[in-house]
Image: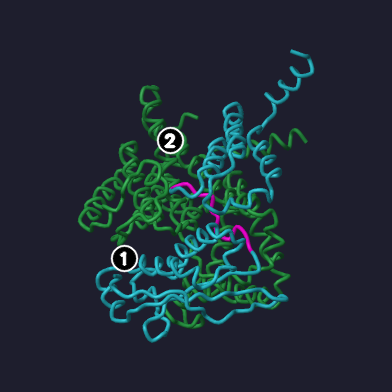
Amino acid sequence: MKKQLFRLKALFKPAEFSACELLVMRLLFALVVWAVIPERIDLFEQAAPVGMAKWFGLDFTFLSNPEILTMLRGVLFAALVLYCSGRLLFVALPVMLFMTVSCGTLINSQKAATHSTQIIALCVMVQCAWHLYAAFKHHRSGMPTASRRLMEGRMAVWYTQQMIATAYIVTAITKWLAKGSWIADSRFFPLQIVKSQRMDYYNSLQPQDQASGSYGIISDILAPFALWMEKTMMSYPGWAPVFLAPGFLVELLAVLLLAGRKIGGAYAVILIIFHLTIAEMMNLRFVYHIFVLGIFFSGMAFWLARGIEAIKWPPRRNQAVE
Amino acid sequence: MPENLKKSLQKIWTFPCKSPAFLLIVCLCYEGKLMMLTKTDPLPFHYLALLFIAAVLLFFDRGLTIKACVALLIANMALRDNYPFSHYPMYASFSDHTYYVFVAGKDDKPLPLEKMTKGIRTSKLKKPYNRDIDKKRKELGKRRTRHLTAEERREAGEQALAQVYRNCKPEAKASLEKLAPIKLYHVDIYMVDGRVDERPPQFIAEIDLPPK
């Protein structure tokens, strides 16, 4: 038993990503951060301030000025180029953090919290904290530069992975603590389906059958399954807990995302399917969650890096000082 | 120090994963007790104190490789919906009642809100409205928002409509003004005997544009 526990514990450690894999991850994540920052924000007030706006009384409505936002997006672009290059990360990441947090705070300070971009801002936050710490701690360590960068990159991904797992566990804990009977109460879930479908209808007055799926071919594949689940739950609400309890457990056990590349990868695929099914059924599109799962867990970076390395990139795996 | 206490403390000191285990105990103890966790009210002091103890234990959790995970878990649970932190309260609890809202023009025909405002979805209309009627519910001492009358919801409806207008792009403002006064309708949905029962739309509020 003790041996098995030790073996299980040994799985929870940073993966040994190659330099090329880290580059691919940074590139893809930079694209996501760029997508998170809107080109224009038409919010001229902070009706119910949250976060920095509440704690420090900061007013982020200056971001609704198109000229200022365009200028800041230019600065962000430069920071993202630096971030992708893997150089001066302690300069690039605070800029990325400022942009994600300030835009997100303004958008969430409208008496209406949305939960789509928090995961990106938190990933940037943990990477920023780690690289600032590493910049001050390791610059005089005497370690060869390439090895130091590789080690810092791997640790940054490890903390980011922990952040992503945390987001899912927190979701499950909140459900658990809110009333204490989430699974039993999920027999009322069909009401939420009706509500979200009706609200979606009043966005465009387009009947749901005519509405196009959110994820192209994936939507087409998942649509029959989602439709079957939806119809079953609508006709027999008592069955809803059977469909929803596994989703709750998948969120609660998301710590398994950190149990090595294989288990983590498989778990990420389960979570992605979970998100895609919800998107089909309730029109809730957690695209950024899917992106971060894909980038940091699914193995996509590994295969892309293998492709690049096969062309000419010399792997630096062996240069690392563990 | 008594020998037994010393031994117990030593056991706690060497126990692996102290902080996650403690957090699990906190969750087990609080299951169902924090009915207001999904709302924005301040959390009970003793609950925050327990989270603080978990944070202290984390500091002494030697050999725990997922320390950041536990630290971020505590931070998100304590700071709740304060960007970038969040405890993700959406769909955290269900009941036999929910509702949705929509906007109609002067002829009472529904408007395609997202299309007309070029980006504001009905969910963005509902959330501030929901927040304000919940505030009203507390003021009036009613148990649930479903017990509020249309008149008691009117102010929240007007504010929600005004907020949509204020945050519209100029071209969207112009097209909304042509349809003024704009109206907010509220539709209750109940689960009755295992069946979804959708009630007729209820008029809540209207505002002239631009608001006077």
Q: Secondary structure at mark 1?
A: helix
Whether residue A138 is situated above or below residue B91 in the rendered picture: above
Residue A12: x and y, percent?
A: 60, 39
Within the magenta stretch, is there residue A38?
Answer: no
Chain letter for the green part: A
Q: Secondary structure at mark 2?
A: helix
In-front residue for pair A201/A80: A201
Residue A76: x and y, percent?
A: 28, 49
Whether residue A210 is situated above or below residue B149 in the rendered picture: below
* Subunit of label 1: B
Determine which quarter of the picture holds residue A273.
Answer: bottom right
Chain letter for the cyan part: B
Residue A218 appears anywhere in the view: yes
Would you name the residue on which mark 2 appears? A130
In-front residue for pair A232/A201: A201
- Give the spatial CA distance, label 1 vs label 2: 40 Å
Write the residue at 24% across / 51% down. Answer: A74
Which quadrant does the N terminus of chain A fall into?
top right
Segment tinted magenta in the rendering = B84-94
Q: Main secondary structure of the magenta part?
A: loop
Q: Is residue B13 left or right of residue A305?
A: right
Residue at the farthest bottom position: B107
Would you name the residue on which mark 1 appears? B166
Q: Is residue B172 left or right of residue A20?
A: left
Binning the other alpha carbons within 10 Å of mark 2 as few (below 14), some (14 to 19) or many (20 upward) gives many
